[in-house]
Image: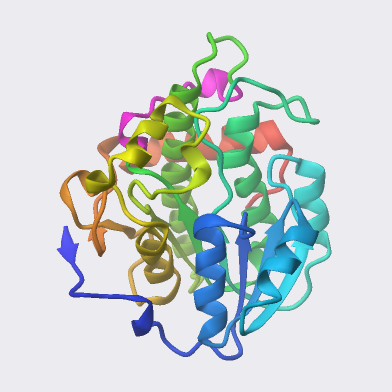
Amino acid sequence: MTRIPSWTAHDLPDLTGRTVVITGAGRGLGLITARELARVGARVVLGVRDTGKARRVVAALPGTFDVRPLDVSDLTSVRAFADAWSGDLDILVNNAGVMDIPAARTADGLDVQTTTNHTGPFLLTTLLLDHLTDRVVHVTSELHKQGRLDLADLDRRTRKPNGMQAYQASKLAVVLFSLELQRRLTAAGSPVRSVLASPGIARTSLAAHSRSNIVNRLTFLTNTPERGALSLLYAATQDIPGNSYIGPDGPGGFRGSPAVRRQGKAGLDPAMAARLWNATVDLVGAVAR
């Protein structure tokens, strides 16, 4: 782990002229990230399910915001967002996610948690890739290290429902997606980077409905949302190598300031990453290079 001395949002560079898309930016870590990037000059596009609520929230904030409808669990919504995009996109932050929810199916018949955390962001990224100029930030979790993937049942149709196992697997999928995306970008000679950010255990509403919400009451183990968002902000703006993993510097990566950490061993398997890419393309019907 490489510690980054005392890095805060006050160290953000000037982003005037840059365009950023943040999914799930209507609240929590996504909103904090949007607020801080707009504060330093970026044009921030919020991809959200509730556009009215998001517009009311950002109306009180300084900066340039563009609120657009986007539900990453709905592949029709993802394709519509990507089809409507024109011009350059400097930074894409795949922040939207759900955690440990009851098993359910999307309008496309896909597992909600897998689609929200991995499949939808995968499709969005691949559809926007030709517009990207700088990087993709994938928000993951230290819990990816406990994840197990079954590529024969990526959409969780044959296994007994288990919300936490599905969450862990989806976050491992995010890490492997970054690995394979970076390999493809490098092979193509692209300057675009794929990087990862973990907020640690940030006290947000993500786990509010889950048995894991008990951690939100153990403040000595957790980051405030403001501090958790620092990993996203660092990953989005600093000069780091492709497939870097940014997370809190405290024990277990639970809390602390941003540091360059290391993915779990399963997230560094290039053969599995390539197989996951193909399995995801088969699942969503994406035309992904």
96 above or below 170? Answer: below
- Residue at the limit of the structure toward the front, as seen here: 217
The image shows residue 103 at horizontal and vertical percentages of: 61, 20
Which quadrant of the figure contains the N terminus?
bottom left
| Image: 76 above or below 266 | below
Colour scheme of the rendered structure:
rainbow
What residue is at 24 percent from the left and 58 percent from the top? Answer: 256
Residue nearest the observer in this picture, 232 or 128: 232
Q: Is residue 289 visible?
A: yes
> x, y (%) of residue 181?
49, 53
Up the image or down, 126 lies above or below 252; here it is below
Position of residue 240 in the picture relative to residue 26 (left or right): left
Asked whether residue 269 appears in the rendered view, the answer is no
Residue at the (40%, 82%) spot, across then down: 12
Instruction: State yes or no: residue 154 in magenta.
Output: yes
Left-right relation of 171 to 102:
left
State the image coordinates of residue 66 (x, y, percent, origin top left). Answer: 74, 73
- Residue at screen point 49% across, 58% down: 29
Q: Residue at x 54, y 10 (%)?
A: 159
Total numbered labels: 0
157 is within the stretch colored magenta: no
Q: Position of residue 228 (x, y in %)?
A: 37, 58
Q: Is residue 70 left or right of residue 103?
A: right
In which quarter of the view is residue 155 placed? top right
- Which quarter of the figure has residue 74? top right
Q: Of residues 26 and 91, which is closer to you in this image? A: 26
- Residue range corresponding to the magenta coloring: 143-155
